[in-house]
Amino acid sequence: MKTAILIPARFASSRYPGKPLVGLKGAGGAEKPLIQRSFEAATRVPGLAEVHVVTDDPRIAETVRSFGGSALMTSEAARNGTERCAEALDQLAADIDVIVNFQGDALLTPPGFVTALVDQLATNASAEVVTPAMRQRVDEVRRLQAEEAAGRVGGTSVVVDGEGRALYFSKKLIPYLPERALDGEMSPVRLHIGVYAYRRSALASYVATPPSELEELEGLEQLRFLVAGIPIHVVEVATPAFTLRELNNPEDVSPIEDALAMAGLE
């Protein structure tokens, strides 16, 4: 199966405008823009045919090309990263079987997470959309609870059925956690990692389906698949030693730089 990674990036983020170009210091102190760090994270995945940033903003495209990356231009009409990936399909080689949506703020995503998704599509003919999740340590859940109480979005959680298919995603912590649920080292909470692998047919179905009320309320594009009756298979991945953080708010810069240092990423 030939795989392409697409990294959707837009300048006009509602929570953090211009975040693809925000500089982040690595383990050695060198600063690189977020979009470069995400591109480098994507290129660490083995066995890829292509890696591209997909954007409607010339400032982002120029930055990507300045560090030697590939940028594909899409229209301003795309409402989210999945729609932007679907729009870019015509610019990919015709023999690309799997499209990976690698979120532009998911710079800490281990390469093995993406490999696990591609492997799942290769071995499960019924799967059209696959995404990873990992169990959260109790101390991290308590941090997310504090962020939630302060009105900040700290991550997306997912609950699954007995076959590993997603039942629901939310920016709230799910499921409900009685105090006893946080007695051990690991919690029942699965943190959703914002990476997806699709077959081409899934993307075609997605853009043919209007946004749902749940998608708009939660601000989570993947809920459109569930409302349309397209299962999302969740691959449980090992929780890494460092904290996986996405750049959602300016307050996330310092913790992400700490995680880059812990992961040894220059």
Image (tube, rainbow, N blue to C red):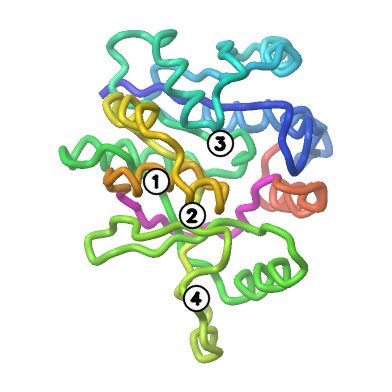
Q: Looking at the picture, which amino acid does disc 1 mark?
A: Thr
Does label 1 or label 3 sit earlier along the sequence?
A: 3
Q: CA distance from mark 1 to mark 2?
A: 8 Å
Question: Residue shown at 56%/14% (left/top)?
Answer: 74
The residue type indicated by label 4 comes to Met
Q: Whole-Å distance between the Cαs marked 2 and 4?
A: 15 Å
Between 105 and 211, the one nearer to me in the picture: 211
Out of 170 and 118, give the one closest to the viewer.
170
Q: Which residue is mark 2?
A: 192
Instruction: Assess whether mark 2 and mark 1 are in contact (beta carbons under 8 angstroms).
Output: yes
Residue that numbered label 3 is attached to: 103
Residue neighbourhood size for the residue with mark 4, other residues' Cα within 10 Å, grouped as few (<14), some (14–19), many (≥20): some
Question: Is residue 240 a member of the stretch shown in magenta?
Answer: yes
Residue at label 4?
A: 186
Q: Residues within 10 Å of mark 1 (few under 14, many from 20)?
A: many
Q: Earlier in the sequence, mark 3 or mark 4?
A: 3
Quarter of the image where the C terminus is located: top right
Residue pointed to by mark 1:
131
Residue 163 in the image, given as x and y percentages of width and height: 22, 60
x and y percent of residue 236 in the render? 37, 57
Q: Per the image, is 110 magenta? A: no
Few, some or many residues within 10 Å of mark 3 (<14, 14–19, 20+):
many
Instruction: First in sequence, mark 2 or 4: give its number.
Output: 4
